[in-house]
Image (tube, grey):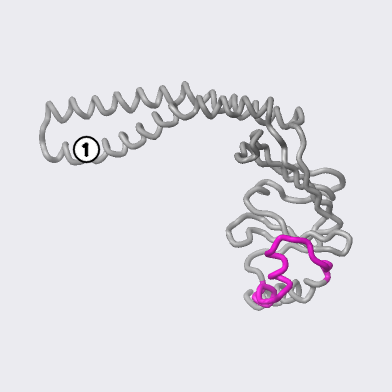
């Protein structure tokens, strides 16, 4: 059902990192421009207060200045930090490692927006169930019969630089889609406890039929 392994970066992996490097490099000229604009604004405020030292002008300009200075400090920190970060990403292309979690799927149930943590999926494979999903699956609407959850790590395997989900094979239609709030009857069961452990256990999607029907009844009652 689940196969975990590590491998060298593929060309597709390296392309992802190169694209991120290009996107980060484009940040420099934009940020420098923003810094110059903010400095000009602050100088303008100083000149205005110096020439018109009235309370009604000093208070609002001082308040705005605090916000401008805070943004300025954050942007300067980014400019100082990013060159090192870029070097680290460039090193990933040569020495990085891909950690892959491969999941094979027979059937699945989709849970839309579970617990404000993104979509989740209850996967069935050869008499086993497991629940996967979360923010990492953002943008994934349907599953194919094999997915790869890929982390790109540095050579020490201590720091990740990219995470993505790749789908392979045949498109699968969901057995069911839970929309809205999950039935309380399901969430109070050992079955749900097993699913939240996110480790495979014996079961099949039909084990959830009574809760699927309960959810339909709850929605009908609320109309």
Foreground residue, 63 or 4? Answer: 4
What is the crowding at mark 1: few (fewer than 14 residues within 10 Å), some, or many (at least 20)? some
For the point 79% across and 65% down, which residue is it? 201
- In the image, residue 172 sits, relative to residue 168, either above or below, namely below
Q: Is residue 37 magenta?
A: no
Q: Decide if residue 15 is on the left or right side of residue 67.
A: right
Residue 74: quadrant of the picture: top left
- Tell me where residue 130 appears, x and y as whole percent: 76, 61
- In the image, residue 178 sits, relative to residue 94, either above or below, namely below
Residue at the front extreme? Answer: 156
- Tell me where residue 53 appears, x and y as whole percent: 10, 32
The C terminus: image quadrant: bottom right
For the point 74% across and 61% down, which residue is it? 199
What's the magenta region?
Answer: 183-206
Q: Is residue 200 magenta?
A: yes
For the point 80% across and 53% down, which residue is it? 2
- Tell me where residue 167 appears, x and y as whole percent: 79, 44
Q: Decide if residue 169 is on the left or right side of residue 161.
A: right
Question: Looking at the image, how many numbered discs can be counted on the residues?
Answer: 1
Foreground residue, 223 or 73? Answer: 73
- In the image, residue 102 sits, relative to residue 9, either above or below, namely below
The N terminus: image quadrant: bottom right
Q: Secondary structure at mark 1?
A: helix
- Tell me where residue 106 appears, x and y as whole percent: 86, 56
Q: Decide if residue 216 is on the left or right side of residue 206.
A: left
For the point 66% across and 76% down, which residue is it? 188
Residue occupied by mark 1: 62
């Amino acid at each position: 059902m689940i196969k975990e392994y590590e491998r060298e970066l593929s060309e597709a992996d390296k392309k992802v990192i190169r694209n991120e490097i290009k996107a980060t490099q484009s940040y420099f000229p934009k940020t420098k421009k923003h810094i110059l604009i903010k400095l000009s604004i602050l100088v303008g405020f100083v000149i205005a207060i110096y020439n018109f030292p009235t309370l009604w002008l000093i208070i609002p300009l001082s308040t705005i200045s605090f916000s401008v200075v805070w943004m300025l400090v954050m942007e300067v920190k980014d400019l100082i930090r990013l060159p090192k970060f870029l070097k680290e990403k460039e090193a990933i292309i040569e020495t990085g490692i891909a950690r892959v979690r491969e999941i094979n799927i027979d059937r699945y149930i989709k849970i839309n927006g579970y617990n404000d943590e993104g979509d989740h999926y209850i996967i069935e494979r050869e008499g086993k169930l497991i629940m996967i999903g979360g923010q990492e699956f953002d943008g994934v609407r349907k599953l194919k019969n094999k997915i790869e959850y890929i982390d790109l790590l540095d050579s020490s395997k201590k720091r990740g630089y990219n995470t993505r989900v790749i789908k392979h094979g045949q498109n699968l239609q969901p057995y069911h889609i839970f929309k809205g709030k999950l039935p309380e009857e399901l969430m109070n069961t050992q079955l749900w406890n097993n699913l939240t452990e996110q480790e495979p256990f014996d079961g099949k999607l039909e084990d959830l039929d009574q809760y699927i029907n309960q959810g339909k009844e709850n929605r009908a009652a609320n109309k």
